[in-house]
Amino acid sequence: MVVEKTVSELAEILGVSRQAVNNRVKTLDPEDVEKNDKGVTVVTRSGLIKLEHIYKKTIIEPEPVDEAALNHEVLQILIDEKNSEIQRLYQQLQSKDEQLARKDEQLRVKDVQIAEKDKQIDQQQQLTLQAMTDRETLQLELDQAMQEVQEVKEEQKRGFFSRMFGGNKQS
């Protein structure tokens, strides 16, 4: 709302002569004074505030406060702030959901890797068991072959007649 007062209005409000107010108005900054559409000099709100300080009197009456409008504005501000906070929290939740989805995918990949490693370990254990079995079999075959070689050597050490007639000659 535009608040402007003429020199005559100010003289009446302040209880001083029109000429005294006019002299004081002439000392105000140019932005504090204007001409209205009738060409009459008027003092703007900023100039009126300066004059209130000079004369120590209230010139601009405070506007009545519309409690309902004020309450509505306050409620609207609170609603806007809450909506903003809700939006921020919603975005934060979306971000967390995306992070959880990435973690779930990472866990799934790790589970696949673990299953593959378990399979590889199982295969290695089977190969190790097979190698040990083969080693034992070969060891038995080697022992048996060595025993046969030993028997052949002992057989060769026995004399011709002992072998012929089945006698046991010990060396």
Image: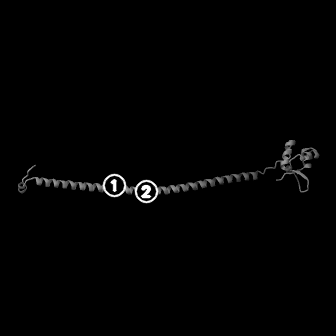
Q: How is the image coloured?
A: one colour
In the picture, measured across the screen, residue 66 lies left or right of residue 161, that is right
Q: Is residue 104 left or right of residue 133?
A: right
- The crowding category of the residue bearing disc 1, from other C-alpha atoms within 10 Å (few below 14, some 14 to 19, many at least 20), is few
The foreground one among 142 and 70 is 142
The percent coordinates of residue 124 (x first, y second) are 35, 56
Q: Amino acid at mark 1?
A: Gln
Residue, disc 1? 125
> Which of the marked residues, 1 or 2, is nearer the chain's N terminus?
2
Classify mark 1: helix, strand or loop.
helix
Q: Residue at 16% of width from left, 55% of height from top? A: 149
Viewer can see residue 110 = yes
Residue position marked by numbered label 2 in the rendering: 113
Residue 78 placement (x, y as % from top left)? 69, 51
Identify the residue at horizontal 19%, vertical 56% (top origin): 145
Give x and y (percent) for residue 61.
Answer: 84, 47
